[in-house]
């Protein structure tokens, strides 16, 4: 079978490898039908993702159809459409014992630490597969995985109905967090540097928007929160100064969520954290949130249609990554398809 492998930074190859077989009773063989390209995949390709190891078959947004089931599998059958959990954990370490396997001491993420979904077939445990609603195409279903990341961030923030939320960044991550957060609280502010993204945020439920290039972030946040500052701030931009900005604009007793993966030093101000008794929390991956995301879709509370802007056959992954690097403004989400590889 064919697979897309990053041999080393900037070195992408389509390789031939042996098709995997179901060798455990509770495992299934999945034929891939769609896999998304995420910012972290681009980071692995360019060598800027500190978590990745090489060579690596990347791809962690994985959708496919069950081809073979192990003899102990009871919840899946041949032909079922599934999305695959990218997180694998040991179940025994301290984080796993307290229910936080997404930061397992022995964490292995498919497509990052171990081989992922940019290949024609993959074998995984039945427990890592989630049945897809018929209302979603395979390409749209890829967006469930980014949605789980958004759900995780809101969960880690303990976001509640009365919170005044600030989302810094209205790109793919920020817009997905907005779609999840609007089901929890009403008072949401979105800040970005692109007016078009801010207009879209307004349509998707943001009460207020701020263009940080033309408006003073701190001044506007205080105006929109009655002088208190945001009670929850989520960094969906990951810029060098974004954390300090959020520490500044978050009000007393607030929570600041960090999601970036940069290893570059970032400036902070201890006084802001201590004097306001802020909680600064990381949010990584997702912790078994696929079920929650799928239930939101089934309930009609989450619409993933229109999220995918471009598709490429997976064997043309190099063209897809080159297109992403072009920064074409029409790009929203790019998905690799496996139906008719060339």
Image (cartoon, rainbow, N blue to C red):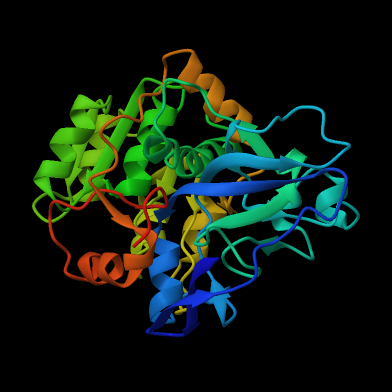
On the picture, is 33 further left or further right than 206? right
Answer with left or right where residue 329 lies relative to residue 292.
left
| Foreground of the two, 321 or 173 | 321
Image quarter where the C terminus lies is bottom left
Query: Does residue 153 appear anywhere in the picture?
Result: yes
Q: Position of residue 44 (x, y in %)?
A: 46, 74
Viewer-closest of 112 and 95: 112
Query: Is residue 53 placed above or below 22 in the rendered structure?
Result: below
Foreground of the two, 1 or 265: 1
Residue 71, compared with residue 272, is above or below; it is above
Residue 186 at x, y = what percent? 37, 20
The residue positioned 60% from the left and 35% from the top of the image is 290
Question: Residue furthest toward the top?
Answer: 299
Q: Position of residue 136 (x, y in %)?
A: 41, 27
Q: Is residue 229 visible?
A: no
Whole-percent x and y of residue 109? 64, 61
The N terminus lies in quadrant: bottom right
Q: Identify the residue shown where x is 78% and y is 55%.
A: 89
């Amino acid at each position: 079978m064919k697979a897309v492998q990053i041999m080393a930074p900037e070195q992408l190859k389509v390789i031939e490898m042996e098709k995997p077989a179901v060798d455990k009773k509770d495992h299934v063989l999945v034929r891939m039908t769609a896999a998304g390209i995420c910012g972290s995949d681009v980071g692995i390709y360019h060598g800027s993702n500190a978590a990745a190891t090489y060579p690596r078959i990347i791809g962690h947004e994985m959708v496919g159809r069950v081809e073979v089931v192990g003899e102990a599998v009871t919840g899946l059958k041949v032909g079922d459409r599934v999305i695959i959990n990218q997180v694998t954990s040991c179940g025994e370490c301290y984080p796993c014992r307290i229910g936080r396997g997404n930061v397992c001491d022995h964490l292995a993420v498919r497509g990052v630490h171990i081989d992922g979904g940019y290949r024609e077939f993959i074998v995984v445990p039945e427990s890592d597969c989630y049945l897809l609603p018929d209302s979603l195409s395979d390409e749209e279903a890829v967006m469930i995985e980014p949605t789980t990341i958004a759900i995780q961030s809101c969960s880690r923030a303990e976001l509640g109905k009365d919170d005044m939320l600030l989302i810094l960044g209205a790109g793919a991550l920020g817009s997905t967090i907005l779609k999840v957060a609007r089901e929890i609280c009403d008072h949401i502010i979105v800040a970005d540097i692109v007016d078009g993204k801010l207009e879209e945020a307004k349509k998707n439920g943001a009460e207020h928007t701020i263009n940080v290039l033309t408006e003073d972030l701190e001044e506007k946040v205080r105006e929109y929160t009655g002088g208190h500052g945001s009670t929850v701030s989520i960094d969906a931009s990951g810029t060098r100064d974004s954390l300090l900005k959020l520490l500044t604009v978050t009000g007393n007793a607030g929570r600041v969520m960090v999601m970036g993966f940069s290893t570059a030093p970032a400036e902070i101000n201890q006084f802001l954290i201590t004097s306001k008794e802020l909680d600064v929390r990381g949010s990584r991956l997702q912790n078994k949130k696929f079920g929650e995301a799928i239930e939101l879709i089934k309930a009609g509370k989450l619409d993933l249609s229109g999220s995918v802007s471009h598709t490429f056959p997976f064997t043309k992954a190099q063209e897809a990554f080159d297109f992403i690097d072009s920064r074409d403004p029409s790009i929203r989400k790019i998905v690799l398809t496996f139906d008719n590889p060339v």
